Amino acid sequence: MAFAWKASGLTYNRYLAVAARVVRRSLKEQPRLQAEKRGEMDLRFAKWENGKQGENKNLATANANAMAAGAGQGQQ
């Protein structure tokens, strides 16, 4: 017998994300706010050149900047 999440076409990671969101939403106000803060992610990256690490940058901010720059170039 297959797992329900697998039979419905979800990946295991997606299943875990949905389950975690359901649990967070079922909590009372204060524990819910604390759990939501733990669920947020802050991804950072750094470009390496000549064996040295560059400046750490926030991935979401860098992605938004790159998308805006790409959209501006497409209009010219």
Image (cartoon, rainbow, N blue to C red):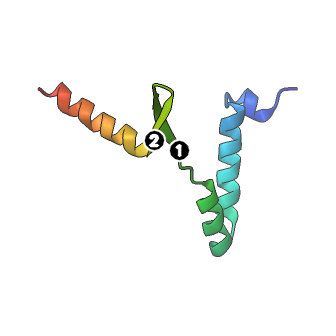
Label 2: which secondary element = helix
**On screen, 23 above or below 62?**
below
Disc on res. 11? none
Q: Position of residue 67 (x, y in %)?
A: 31, 35
| Outermost residue, left side | 76
Tag 1: amino acid: Leu
| Outermost residue, right side | 1
Mark 2: give few (<14), some (14-19) or many (20+) Cα within 10 Å. Answer: some
Q: In which quadrant of the rendered view does residue 54 lie?
A: top left
User: In this figure, which residue is indicated by the disc labeled 2?
Assistant: 59
Q: Are marks 2 and 1 in contact (CB under 8 Å)?
A: yes
Residue shown at the point (65%, 37%) measured from the top left: 14
The total of numbered circles placed on residues is 2
Mark 1: give few (<14), some (14-19) or many (20+) Cα within 10 Å. Answer: few
**On screen, 65 above or below 71?**
below
> Along the horizontal axis of the image, is 41 left or right of 64?
right
**On screen, 8 above or below 33?**
above
Disc on res. 43? 1
Q: Position of residue 37 (x, y in %)?
A: 59, 61
> Along the horizontal axis of the image, is 58 left or right of 37?
left
Tag 2: amino acid: Leu
Q: Quadrant of the N terminus?
A: top right
Q: Quadrant of the C terminus?
A: top left
Q: Nearer the viewer, residue 26 or 72?
A: 72
**On screen, 38 above or below 43?**
below
Q: Position of residue 55 (x, y in %)?
A: 43, 42
Q: Position of residue 53 (x, y in %)?
A: 49, 35
Q: How far is the residue under mark 2 from the one under mark 1? A: 5 Å
Sequence order check, earlier mark of 2 and 1: 1
